[in-house]
Each structure stands twice: as structure tokens, then as C-alpha cells.
Amino acid sequence: MQSRLKLKDDCPQCGLALERGERADFWIGAYVFNLVAGEVVAIGVPIIWMIASAPNQPWTEIEIVGAVLCVALPFLFFPFSRTLWLAWDLSFRPVEPGDTSSTTSRTI
């Protein structure tokens, strides 16, 4: 990973090209996965907190934590969602000859 928002072009270990050829729309699935996973966790934590603290729920704290989680989790989960999406894609579409970098001599 070059930064939190940009992956390297190739895997430093095996040379797998992380873009897999579809530059325009390959990562749409990762964005959807990121948003859904982040929001499920963001709504699950307040629900569990409400159930655990019944009957005297601290509503203000629950609302603040829920709002912060809804905004923060997609940003925190972003690099992991791209990696998981690539793994999901590799499980259905195995590595092809053009998927490895020409700069590495390793085989996958």
C-alpha cells in the first residue's frame, strides 16, 4: 500500500498486478463492500450498546458514537476492503498470464 487511499501497482511479494486489467470499474465492488461492512458495524455497535444498557440507555452518547462510526469506519476499512475484494476476485478468476508484473521473476 502506498498510502491509505492508494494501493501500489503490484504486490511487493509476488508481483501480482493489483488492478487486474479493469481500470475503470474494477473497484466498484470494493467500494460497495466497504460501505456495507462499515455501516453494518456502525449500526450494530449502537444496537448492542442499547440492548446491553437497557433500561437506562445513555441516548446522547449512543447517538454520537453511532454518527462517528458511520463516518469513520468506511475510511478506516477502505484498504482492507480493496484487499478483500481482490481476494474475492481471485477466487473466481484465477491469475492469468498478464496479471503479474514484468519486473518480477517469481511465479504465482
Image: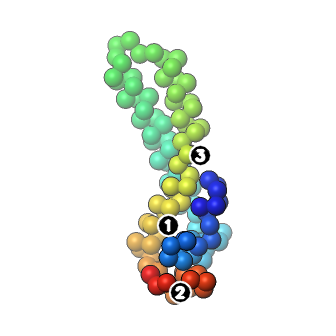
> Please, which residue is most extreme toward the top here?
56
What residue is pinned by disc 2? 105
Q: Residues under labels 2 and 3: Cα distance?
A: 35 Å
- Identified by mark 2, the residue type is Ser
* Residue sitting at x 39%, y 23%: 50
Asked which quadrant contains residue 48, the reply is: top left
Nearer to us of marks 2 and 3 is 2
Residue 75 bears which disc, if any?
3
Labels 2 and 1 touching (C-beta < 8 A) = no
What residue is pinned by disc 1? 86
Residue 53: where, in percent of width, then height? 36, 18
* Residue sitting at x 57%, y 75%: 17
- Identified by mark 3, the residue type is Phe
**Precedes in sequence: disc 2 or disc 3:** 3
Quadrant where the C terminus sits is bottom left
Q: Residues under labels 2 and 1: Cα distance?
A: 22 Å
* Residue sitting at x 50%, y 76%: 14
